[in-house]
Amino acid sequence: MKTGIKNLVLARALMAVLGLIQAGRLTAQTFETLHTFTGGDGANPHAGVVLSGKTLYGTTEAGGSSGSGTIFAH
C-alpha cells in the first residue's frame, strides 16, 4: 500500500474510533478577584504568582511603605 493511501486509511480509522469516545461533562471556569491593591499595600503586581500549598505569593513593582513594592501572600 502506498504511504498516502495508508495514511488516509489510518486517519479514517482514527476518526471512527474517536467518534465512539464520549466527551466528559465540561464545566466552565469561574474567576474572582482576590484582592485589589490600593497603593499602600502594593501597586502594579509584577510577574506571576506562585502557589505553595493553598497560599498564593507574588510581588508588586511599587507601593508599600517605601514605595518600592511589596511581597504579598493570599
Image: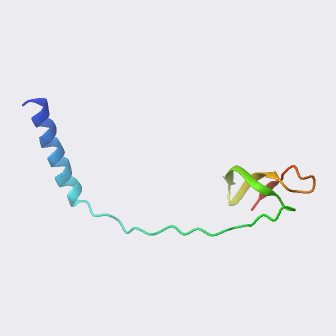
Total marks placed: 0
**Residue 16 image offset from top left, x and y in percent:** 17, 54
Query: Residue, x 23% and y 55% (percent of image)?
Result: 18
**Residue 46 image offset from top left, x and y in percent:** 73, 50
Query: Residue, x 88% and y 56% (percent of image)?
Result: 64
Q: Quadrant of residue 1?
A: top left
Q: Is the image coloured rainbow, by chain, by secondary structure, or in one colour? A: rainbow
Seen in the image, is 72 located left or right of residue 67?
A: left
**The C terminus sits in image quarter:** bottom right
Residue extending furthest toward the top: 2
**Residue 65 image offset from top left, x and y in percent:** 92, 56
Seen in the image, is 7 located left or right of residue 58?
A: left
Query: Residue, x 79% and y 57% (percent of image)?
Result: 43
**Residue 11 image offset from top left, x and y in percent:** 18, 44
Q: Nearer the viewer, residue 48 or 14?
A: 48
Residue extending furthest toward the right: 66
Answer above or below: position of 57 versus 32.
Answer: above
Q: Nearer the viewer, residue 74 or 67?
A: 67
Query: Residue, x 58% and y 68% (percent of image)?
Result: 31
